């Protein structure tokens, strides 16, 4: 991973379900949906039940339905802790 890449890790209590570099992440925030791109300002936010949409660096798309959780973004590293997959 290059320092400039956006790195994402999605973790449940049981396992890591996503681990890799991405282009962007759409997140179902508790106060409204938002997108994280490279160089996003540091943030910690609560997630509501919804879909985490991951767009890869090549344009591939993946969706993970979550039951809520927490996201932290700092220095191009995004960690999402979710209670489970819906």
Image (cartoon, rainbow, N blue to C red):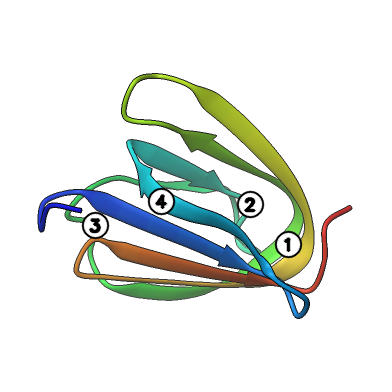
Q: Mark 1 points at which residue?
A: 48
User: Residue drawn 33% across and 36% down?
Assistant: 23
User: Residue drawn 36% across and 73% down?
Assistant: 43
Classed neighbour count for the residue bearing mark 1: other residues with Cα under 10 Å, few (<14), some (14–19), many (≥20) = some
Sequence-wise, the earlier of marks 4 and 1 is 4
The local secondary structure at tag 3 comes to loop
Q: Is residue 32 left or right of residue 26?
A: right
The local secondary structure at tag 4 comes to strand
The local secondary structure at tag 1 comes to strand
Sequence-wise, the earlier of marks 4 and 2 is 4
Q: Which of 18 and 84 is in front in this view?
A: 18
Report if the CB atoms under discs 3 and 4 are less than 8 Å apart: no
* Comparing labels 3 and 4, the label whose residue is closer to the camera: 4
Q: Mark 2 points at which residue?
A: 28
Quadrant in the rendering for residue 49: bottom right
| Label drawn at residue 20 | 4
Sequence-wise, the earlier of marks 2 and 1 is 2
Q: Name the residue under label 3.
A: 40
């Amino acid at each position: 991973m290059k320092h400039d890449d956006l790195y994402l890790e999605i973790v449940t209590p049981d396992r890591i379900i996503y681990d890799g570099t991405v282009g962007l992440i759409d997140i179902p925030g508790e106060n409204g949906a938002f997108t994280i791109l490279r160089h996003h300002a540091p943030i910690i936010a609560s997630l509501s039940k919804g879909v985490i949409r991951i767009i890869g660096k090549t344009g591939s798309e993946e969706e993970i339905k979550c039951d809520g959780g927490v996201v932290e973004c700092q220095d191009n590293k995004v960690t999402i802790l979710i209670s489970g997959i819906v």
